[in-house]
Image: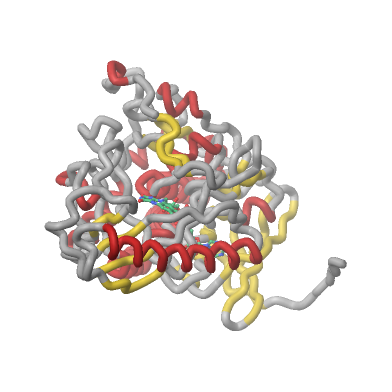
Amino acid sequence: MEKNFVYSTQLESLGAYDVVVVGGGPAGVCAAVAAARGGAKVALVEKTAMLGGMATSGLVGPFMTCYNREGEYPVVGGLFREIVERLIRANGALCPDEMAGKTRYTSYIGKYHSNTTPIDSALLQVVLDEMVLESGVEVFFYTQFVDCKTENSSIQQIIVATPGGLSVIEGKYFIDCSSNADLAFKAGVPTWLGDEESGVPQAATLFFELTNVDDEKYLQRGGHKAYRTPEKGRYKVNDKHVMNVNPADVRSMTRGHIEGRKFAIESFVDMKATMPGFENASLTQIASVLGIREGRHIQGKYMLTVDDVCNSTYFEDAVVTFGYGMDVHSRDASSRGGFSKGSADWYTIPFRCLVPLNCDNLLVAGKTISAQSQAAGSFRVMPACMALGQAAGTAMAMATKENCKPGDVSIKDLQATLVKNGAIIKDSRVDPLNRSAYTLTT
Ligand SMILES: Cc1cc2nc3c(=O)[nH]c(=O)nc-3n(C[C@H](O)[C@H](O)[C@H](O)COP(=O)(O)OP(=O)(O)OC[C@H]3O[C@@H](n4cnc5c(N)ncnc54)[C@H](O)[C@@H]3O)c2cc1C
């Protein structure tokens, strides 16, 4: 029988901030940096000891396309571009402008895989450390958000588990970049898991890296997906599916991770035996964090739909442009998954998707923003998550200055600041859209 316990104690405050960001993945780093550069006093809370989320602790890469669907011009700029340029200078990335599809860097996948950015996950950690420290963000590593205290529909403090025990962090505003809407959920924002009808999330996968692969011999995609990193002979592998993992359930995560590790070894053995170029490969790392493609989604002021992604709906409050297909992996063992639907040549995401219901001083950024599960299959990849983070952080810096609810900032000023800082916000009323190629790919 289930037992419940009530626990009450005095907690020490680690500090008070204008903006507290929960989660230091692609979205959280960009949210924190944008808010700090906008003048806010920012804390960034991260449960591992590295920034980058899936791109570092999850070993995921490359950064997916940052171009329009046809691969003609970039649709993501801003902090994403700055991270890529810094990483190139550190010899940790290759330039997406020069990245053709159907190569070993894109795992010989043609559709939507041109203009990706091969990355080195270790060097990315260092680049992101530098960026947050330069911008004046206070980072709390080994610090997991566990709960929050709310009053009058506003979060007052968050409760975090640190190496020293439970503490609180006080904030005027909060941004949830936890990738499972952990803070939004605890603050009373309506959420759902996975597909909005079935409640089943997409499959998870545990990445691993191989070295000593013969680049010249690996010419075609075999049964496994391997992506070359900037380093000769080093590959990231995204292979088998772990089904039905709920990222908020510790038993489910434990089972999923163990299964993922077993699958990684099976894939490695199979690749060595069957894939040209992998005969002498060495397994150097298995990711320390399970790759969760989908967890909770939040209910926000607007819910992005499949139709919006397919038809490039015009939004007056657009803050992000993207052009990747709806990459929805299977939810049961019967199919492998892939592009369930194409996207328009490019589409935009409105600010209202980042503004949750029922909580006045919170924004949400990353893959959990308010959208249909299938639509999220497009923007869940890292360039879009970074652009969403930048939009949330910029809005919070404005809210801090204006002392208003983040959902009430001036959209015109927000868009102008984002564009001034390199973001790309396209307008389907004036920007050319390749409508001729609108047939949906399957
Ligand atoms: C198997 C797989 C393959 C993928 N392939 C690609 C690809 O090839 N290219 C691409 O661009 N994208 C890919 N993606 C998508 C992409 O990696 C993620 O969707 C993206 O990283 C989401 O960014 P995020 O910042 O929202 O979340 P995450 O990257 O998940 O970062 C969330 C961060 O928050 C921290 N955190 C979580 N909860 C808490 C808490 N309670 N307290 C404190 N910290 C917390 C985590 O430790 C993490 O650092 C893939 C994803 C998966 C799972």
| Residue 327 appears left or right of 203 | left
Residue 403, can we see it? no
Q: Quadrant of residue 271?
A: bottom left
**On the rendered image, what quadrant is the N terminus found in?**
bottom right
**Residue shown at 66%/68% (left/top)?**
159
In the picture shown, does residue 263 fall above or below 5? above
How has the structure been colored for display? secondary structure
Give percent across and percent down for residue 266. 41, 65
**Towards the viewer: 12 or 97:** 97
Residue 132, can we see it? yes
In the picture shown, does residue 271 fall above or below 387? below
Most distant residue in the left direction: 216
Give percent across and percent down for residue 96. 21, 47
Most distant residue in the bottom direction: 164
Give percent across and percent down for residue 151. 74, 54
In the picture shown, does residue 192 fall above or below 275? above
Give percent across and percent down for residue 224. 33, 53
Q: Quadrant of residue 247?
A: bottom right
